[in-house]
Amino acid sequence: MAFSFCKSFGKDKVIFATKEDHAVPSKIELPPPEAPQGLISKNGDINWSCPCLGGMATGPCGVDFREAFSCFHYSEAEPKGSDCYEAFRQMQDCFQQYPTVYNKANGADDDDDALGDVMNADNNGGSVKDVDELSSGAGAAAAVANNTTVSKVE
Amino acid sequence: MSIWSVRCLCHKFCRQAHILAHRRVISPPTKTAQRLQLALLNSGSARQAHNSLYQMVKKRTLEARTKLQANKYPNHNACMRVPKAVEFVPEVDDEVAQSSVTKLHHSSEVQAQHGQSYNTFQDPHFRLGYADTRSHSTAQDVLKSSQCEKPSEPVSKDVCKETPVDPCEEFNRLRRETAAEMFGSGGDCAGGAGGGGGGDDDKKAAEERYKQLKLKCLVGALGALLAGGFIAWLLSRDSKKTIVDESGEIIDNSEEALKRAKISGLITTPRSSDKLPSSVPYLIIGGGTAAFSAFRAIKSNDARAKVLMISNEFRKPYMRPPLSKELWYTPNPNEDPIKDYRFKQWTGSERSLYFEPEEFFVDPEKLESSANGGIAVAQGFAVKKVDAQNRIVTLNDGYQIGYEVCLIATGAQPKNLPVFRNAPPSVREKVMVYRTPEDFDRLRRYAREKRSITIVGNGFVGSELACSLAHYSKENGGGRVYQVFQEKGNMSKVLPNYLSNWTTRKMEAQGVCVIPDASIKSANRDDTQLRLELNNGMTLLSDIVVVCVGCTPNTSMAGPSKLEVDRSLGGFVVNAELEARRNLYVAGDASCFYDPLLGRRRVEHHDHSVVSGRLAGENMTGAKKPYQHQSMFWSDLGPEIGYEGIGLVDSSLPTVGVFALPSDGDKRADTHNEVSADSKTTDTVIKEGSTGADVTCDPNEEANYGKGVIFYLKNDKIVGILLWNLFNRIGLARTIINQNKTYDDLNEVAKLFEIHT
């Protein structure tokens, strides 16, 4: 058995731990990590602050996006969202007015960028190593819409 | 019909999600729903969730990192290469100088700003220390003793150019050789050398003056010619622009010309302050990261919010971290100043420095009438005063804007050193600070021309920049990079001594000529270069000096506004909800806030600007939330060092570091399997004579601090965590800090971080 060992530089201690030592599970029990904000809050409302929206709700078409997405989220129609045509059309019209803001999702190169940002923002449990959190990405809408569909399907 | 359209949209969305699923997530395809649920809502309550997240992200992270870094850092030779003696054509230099002057002018106004900064742990001592040249450093003694033996002349020339011996190598060799001597005769020798050096200096100075006079005449004449031409060109360009703009004619490049004028600070946006609304619901003073983050939060909670941002920069909000990192590694950089500063992220994708493109923003003149609100940025305006009682902000030109709720996010500005501040203009034009894209452009011009660059300071910006420049210089085939600071190692305010020293060695291996234990005694202008006399006897010839010695928060409006500024930490004093007064908040670098967990703090980091800006924005829309989400920071220093931290990561605290020992290595010494957290027994002995520590460290020089976790303790509680070459574990670190607990066995805590994976 290999041993871990320990050194000391005054107030600074150093432990060199072997893989074997750390293979034994830790005895420390931690509470669950800070729950990151999800897209849908516990009461079923949409959380417009969710980083997963990648700035969709705050952009120049934020209001249109909210209307379309709310309509879709609360839609009782069958199939879901079929009563939201008008809202989605308005949103699309708005998107077209701001190609440099919303075009990201259409270009083949960039679309995975925005989605990636969404993923990163959430995977890190709210910690954002990416400087990206503050940037929008139209692709977020995709993830959002899909997620809603999926959870409703279940 | 309608159903079909919605379906189309959904289909499009699904396609996106498909891409997402396939490119990013590695998990069984059958559990699509669950997976997305996890990814998006991230319930993550169990360790299981932790694990799968790690697995998922780790692979990508590692791949991206190794790929990027393999490309980025091809060469690991230490300061070994004999630099090419580069002859500079005076005209070229003049041009640089010329543009430097204008740039300096410009940037000194602009750089007063916003957003994150890396130098969290700055205190006044740092700066004061530089003013005071006589520190008892080993390097000083070493170099002085070397001066005793040799006439001072060769020392005062650029060792890089004149001698085949690399100054860094030489320096290190001398240091090693005289390591023993230092204790005994060092002081004596240093004194003698000091006197001799003084006499020599006088003679030299006289010679220098004469030479300079002669040169000045020549250069002056030439410079006048060039300057005249340049100014004429500028004026003609400017007037053309103005004409174009005012007459509203559409000439080919009018839009571009306008954009250039705006960015170069020639005109404000809007043209005059009376075009700004006289009152707005949300007013943000400052245009950096915290300001933009606050806007996001406001608009998320108030869909039709009208937000006016007043920035004294001439740019739209942008992020700063890449300025000292990624931008230097981006190949084929676009030289155009109106470019959007694109760079490759660590994930491999490309993006701009700007948070959002120009189109995202509302014209300030149209903000009031816009139906859906939005954000307008008044660029190039400064605020003199905030009247919190009457909710009125006064601009520098006297224009007043009423608000309902206001955020101060004025950021910080880089400090300079007295030795440069009090220097003649000819010296000052070769000295810069580093905070803005203009600074980046300027420094890259020097780097591209293979100039020798000296960085002063050992903090985040200085150390990252030194690494980035060393890399750039390697790619570019020239230009020496010196890093001078009076501490013993890089990042010494953050990293414990042993790690700081280790880091310095790694940086040297990357080609940075690190000169620790040294401060700048004087700076003189040579024909083309600056001559820096260090207090250790060394002389550096450098084309540009970049001062990276921390920031001071921009609180000049505190006096007229009758707001409190923290005496020791600086920054506007606010409560845990970031509120200075009713309906007046402060976020980012300029905010000295009360952290309910860790006490009163002021933090200068990008993520803190994001976090505090968001919190302020939420509270501006009525959330009434205290600061409870700890911000983090990160830094990268070349191919072998990347770290993230959270909490109080302050090297003056006792620390316990747990590093991964490669299992195949046969290193075993003591059988201390456990470490008791009795670290408050402060053995100041080693701290005092840290040269002693170095010596005892020598047998274990090869100790590999490749990967690990470092706990920073206060009253035996974990108050800070540094993740050394470990990524995607900051959430776990945050959880541990929030416990605010004492742990008997920190090795057990370290196990949670899976440092061997």
Image (tube, rainbow, N blue to C red):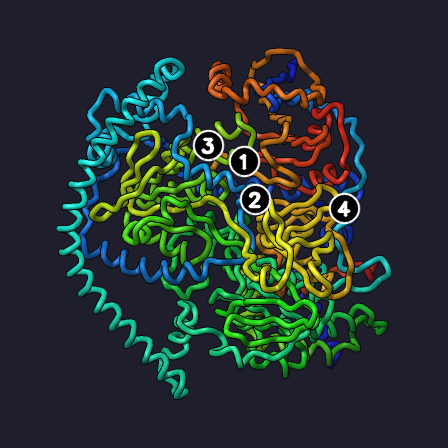
Judge depth for marks 3 and 4 and give the one in front: 3
Q: Is residue B1 above or below residue B160?
A: below
Q: Which residue is disc 3 drawn over? A: B487
Q: Quote the CA–CA distance across marks 1 and 2.
A: 9 Å
Judge depth for marks 1 and 4 and give the one in front: 1
Q: Which residue is disc 1 drawn over? A: B493
Q: Quote the CA–CA distance across marks 3 and 4.
A: 38 Å
Q: Which residue is disc 4 drawn over? A: A34
Q: Secondary structure at mark 4?
A: loop
Q: Quote the CA–CA distance across marks 3 and 2.
A: 16 Å
**Could you tell me residue B622's position as x and y percent?**
77, 64
Dot 2: few (<14), some (14–19), or many (≥20) neighbours within 10 Å?
many
Name the residue nearer the viewer: B345 or B196.
B196
**Could you tell me residue B376's position as x and y percent?**
58, 73
CB within 8 Å, label 3 to label 2: no
CB within 8 Å, label 2 to label 4: no
Q: Which residue is disc 2 drawn over? A: B120
Q: Quadrant of the C terminus of chain B?
A: top right
CB within 8 Å, label 3 to label 1: no
Answer left or right for B692 relative to B598.
left
Which amino acid does the dot numbered 2 rest on?
A: Thr
CB within 8 Å, label 1 to label 2: yes
Chain under disc 4: A
Q: Is residue B461 above or below residue B754?
A: below
Q: Are marks 2 and 4 on the same chain?
A: no
**Could you tell me residue B204's position as x and y percent?**
19, 37
Q: Secondary structure at mark 3?
A: loop
Which amino acid does the dot numbered 4 rest on?
A: Glu
